[in-house]
Amino acid sequence: MPDHKGNTNKKTEIKLESDINRIIWTAGTGCPGGKVGLEIETQFVGVNSEASIEISDKSGKKFDTIKKKIYGNKLWLEITVPDKAKDELFAEVKFSKHGVSKKSRGLYLFPGVEIKNLKWDKQEAKRGDILNLTADIKGLADGNEAEIQIWEHDNDEAHDLITKFPVKIKDQKIEADWEFEYVDDTDDIPSQEENEKGYQWPEYFFRVVCAGKSADSGLLRFKDWVEIKVIDKENSPRVDEKYIVLLPNAEKIEGKVDTEGFIKLDNLPPGKIKIEFSELNKK
């Protein structure tokens, strides 16, 4: 940016030069068919100026020219790496109206990256379970990094991200342990349409992301439990008391309080439950 040197109480014209400060790939590596973000930072190009982004590989082969208008001084877009791109990918950005251009550094490309066989070691989980996650990754050498993302599944595909963490590739595989913790989102008020669809079991999947590619695992279902002690006014257990449990999925469980005064139920759908004691209600 130019410095101003001059006297006060005097009009001075300063020319602000348009420029592209930097072009950044959001990942260090990619692969054909994968996706990667591109960030473009500018100065004084003006709102609504059109950027021309030319995509090429190390050989100089040009694959695409993308036209985008900029708002503010930054522009972000997602690039799908061309299937036939080799070695490195480049993005050359031009603002022809301002006569400025800049070329990105090369994004190193791994050929033929595949992510397969994503597996949980269980099909169902309970609070505090330690789950083992595995996947096969071909096309990347040992020591390269992948990211595991844990998502809560939504039938309308508005999935909620629970957590994410890095993991190293070893012997063309990744493996990680994750402690399951159920978080009941009390702020998530169901819409009328969701209520009409009925109860949905909380289910989860994990996603593996590396070199711009991603793949999803199958679903893991969460099942809950409850333990209640039933006592009278003298704190003595109410043995053999009949009860009905109303579950959040509209199912019912009938039973009797055990010999120690407990109601113990397992493999329940998570959510609010209601317990009715038929004999107590008659009194």
Image: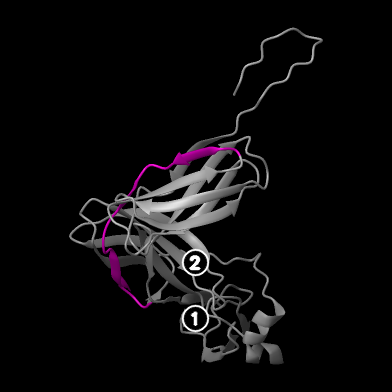
At mark 1, the secondary structure is strand
Q: Residue 265: where, in percent of width, then height? A: 47, 81
Q: Residue 69: where, in percent of width, then height? A: 62, 51
Q: Residue 228: where, in percent of width, then height? A: 53, 75
Q: Is residue 38 above or below residue 176?
A: above
Q: Mark 1 Cα within 10 Å, few/some/many (few <14, many 20+)?
A: some
Please identify the quadrant where the C terminus is shown: bottom right
Residue 182 is tagged as: 2
Q: Are marks 2 and 1 in contact (CB under 8 Å)?
A: no
Please identify the quadrant where the N terminus is shown: top right
Q: Taking 281 as reference, is 218 left or right?
A: left
Q: Is residue 121 magenta?
A: yes
Q: Which residue is mark 1?
A: 268
Q: Taking 47 as reference, is 204 left or right?
A: left
The amino acid beneath tag 2 is Tyr
Mark 2 or 1 closer to N-term? Answer: 2
Residue 67 is tagged as: none
Residue at the image point whose x is 73% and y is 20% from the top = 13
Residue range in magenta is 98-123
The amino acid beneath tag 1 is Leu
Q: Is residue 111 magenta?
A: yes
Quadrant in the rendering for residue 85:
bottom left
Colour pattern of the rendering = one colour
Residue at the image point whose x is 46% and y is 77% from the top = 223
User: Is residue 44 among the parts visible in the rendering?
Assistant: yes
At mark 2, the secondary structure is loop
